[in-house]
């Protein structure tokens, strides 16, 4: 008996249009091999005979349109369901595909043959909204994966404006990237597959180069003005890109939103402003509301006259994620950002891949460096450390606004910098005349680092970063995320 056969493997035969769902416990991993037929994980096809690893408490499903046999090593919570919304999702994909084809035809001035000449020639620019745990991110992934699999050379842009999720960067970031090959699913630490955000060595074959802005908090309500500005910055960048890349533009874009956009009601809260910011910034023409009647009615009422609002079903497989799970995921994400994607294979599995990549290609070695306090300028956006208004001298008015970059002095006890996650900013405009006061709000992020030690008497601090690049003279922003290497 070979080593591989001696593991506890189990074969599942899946009928057409069913899915095998699994949920991993902490510290466990799972290997899945497609033995026969066709299967996909959230729209990304599995290759026959390859072992795919899943870890870090991943919760996902293997879906098949035509039926298949899969071999599972070291199963955990698992079941098969024949009730999935995949047919509805596939119909959506077909509708978006028609929009792309029409947009491309218009771009090339090709004659229209069969369909309605009055139909819009705009590519799909889709905003996905829904309450917590409705499967928004999963739906975005499925739609993007179906588009890139269509064989038309589409590279739709996926934007993630959910700061609690991290996407391709660290949690607290807003990001966007054109997707050229299917996004794999292997761990919630990399919900959208691996990106070349940490170090060049992590440039695996399907790594993406996202555009990233740093918000720095999990909750959108903490600084809605900053969220609004970053969403508009992301949108402006995307539109600038499209001005030059008209072929890329016809692939369209999909925007994944935080659950706070779909939660609660009432016109006064900040979420309407942020939804509006997304609609304007990304020139949205379709809003998908995942499984929420009231939200659908609300979106119809506000946007129904200017764009298409579609309610779509929520999958019964979506897992309710609690607060502690989300905190563990943030830890996995930052660990993965620093050390790469490390998923130990279940016993007996020797040859496996993570989302199709060889395991060794995804491992990183971060560097810990001691720098002087003066090497790095650190800012906090808004008045986090301000005294309450009531504590100000009589007659004094607050001078620090929610959007003002406030310098943070590491020498100050209680600076909040120890173990803080910092977003390292791209350099400001080299032309002094083009600079402006709040420029650092509009700079993209080139990387993240963690302050692991502060030596106030010697004015030194230790930083952990994925590579050894110098940070001297650079500017970083601190938010409310912290991480300790355990
Ligand atoms: N069909 C399915 N089978 C098993 N697990 C699933 C399925 N669909 C989604 N999940 C899992 O459920 C969890 C929640 O899904 P997802 O992140 O897509 O929801 P969301 O609405 O974006 O969440 P959030 O509340 O963070 O905005 C994820 O771990 C995802 O992998």
Image (cartoon, rainbow, N blue to C red):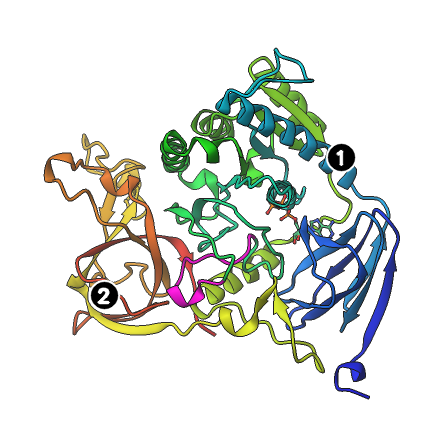
The residue at 78%/45% (across/down) is: 316
What is the x, y in percent for residue 167? 51, 50
Residue at the far left in the pictured view: 433
For residue 308, side relative to residue 407 (left or right): right
For residue 336, side relative to residue 6 (left or right): left
- The answer, for residue 455, to whether it is visible in the render is no
Front one among 9 and 37: 37
Please identify the quarter of the rendering in which residue 242 is found.
top left
Q: Which residue is mark 1?
A: 88
Dot 1 lies on which element?
helix
For residue 470, the mark is 2
Residue segment shown in magenta: 192-204
The residue at 65%/77% (across/down) is: 351
Q: Is residue 360 magenta?
A: no
Residue 23, relative to residue 390: is it above or below? Answer: below
Q: Is residue 198 magenta?
A: yes
């Amino acid at each position: 008996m070979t080593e591989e056969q001696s593991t506890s493997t189990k074969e599942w035969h899946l009928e057409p249009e069913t899915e095998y769902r699994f949920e991993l416990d902490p510290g466990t991993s799972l290997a899945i091999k497609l033995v026969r037929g066709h299967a996909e994980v959230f729209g990304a096809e599995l290759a026959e005979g390859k072992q795919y690893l899943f870890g870090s408490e991943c919760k996902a499903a293997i879906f098949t349109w035509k039926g298949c046999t899969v071999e599972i090593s070291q199963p955990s919570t698992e079941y098969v369901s024949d009730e999935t919304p995949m047919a509805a999702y596939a119909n959506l994909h077909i509708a978006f595909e028609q929009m792309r084809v029409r947009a491309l035809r218009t771009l090339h001035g090709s004659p229209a043959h069969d369909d309605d000449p009055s139909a819009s020639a705009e590519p799909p620019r889709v905003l996905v909204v829904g309450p917590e745990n409705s499967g928004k991110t999963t739906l975005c992934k499925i739609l993007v994966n179906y588009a890139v699999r269509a064989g038309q050379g589409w590279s739709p842009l996926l934007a993630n404006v959910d700061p609690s999720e991290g996407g391709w960067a660290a949690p607290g970031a807003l990001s966007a990237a054109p997707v050229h090959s299917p996004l794999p699913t292997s761990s919630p630490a990399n919900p959208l597959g691996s990106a070349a955000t940490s170090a060049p060595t992590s440039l695996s074959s399907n790594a993406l180069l996202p555009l990233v802005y740093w918000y720095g908090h999990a909750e959108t309500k903490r600084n809605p003005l900053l969220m609004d500005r970053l969403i508009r910055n992301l949108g402006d960048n995307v539109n600038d890109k499209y001005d030059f890349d008209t072929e890329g533009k016809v692939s369209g874009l999909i925007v994944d939103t935080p659950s706070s956009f779909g939660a609660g009601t009432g016109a006064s809260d900040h979420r309407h402003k942020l939804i509006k910011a997304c609609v304007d910034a990304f020139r949205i023409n379709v809003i998908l509301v995942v499984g929420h009647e009231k939200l659908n009615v609300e979106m119809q009422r506000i946007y129904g006259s200017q764009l298409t609002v579609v309610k779509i079903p929520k999958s019964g497989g979506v897992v309710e994620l609690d607060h502690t799970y989300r905190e563990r995921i943030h830890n996995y994400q930052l660990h993965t950002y620093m050390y790469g994607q490390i998923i130990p294979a279940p016993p007996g599995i020797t040859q496996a891949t993570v989302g199709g990549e060889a395991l060794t290609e995804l491992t990183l070695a971060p560097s810990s460096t001691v720098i002087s306090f003066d090497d790095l300028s650190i800012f906090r956006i808004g008045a986090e450390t301000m005294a309450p208004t009531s504590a100000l001298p009589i007659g004094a008015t607050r001078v620090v606004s929610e959007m003002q970059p406030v310098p943070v002095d590491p020498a100050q006890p209680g600076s909040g910098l120890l173990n803080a996650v910092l977003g390292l900013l791209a350099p400001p405009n080299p032309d002094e005349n083009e600079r402006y006061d709040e420029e650092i709000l509009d700079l993209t992020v080139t990387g993240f680092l963690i302050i692991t030690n502060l030596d106030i008497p010697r004015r030194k601090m230790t930083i952990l970063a994925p590579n050894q690049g110098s940070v001297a003279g650079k500017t970083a922003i601190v938010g409310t995320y912290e991480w300790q290497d355990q």
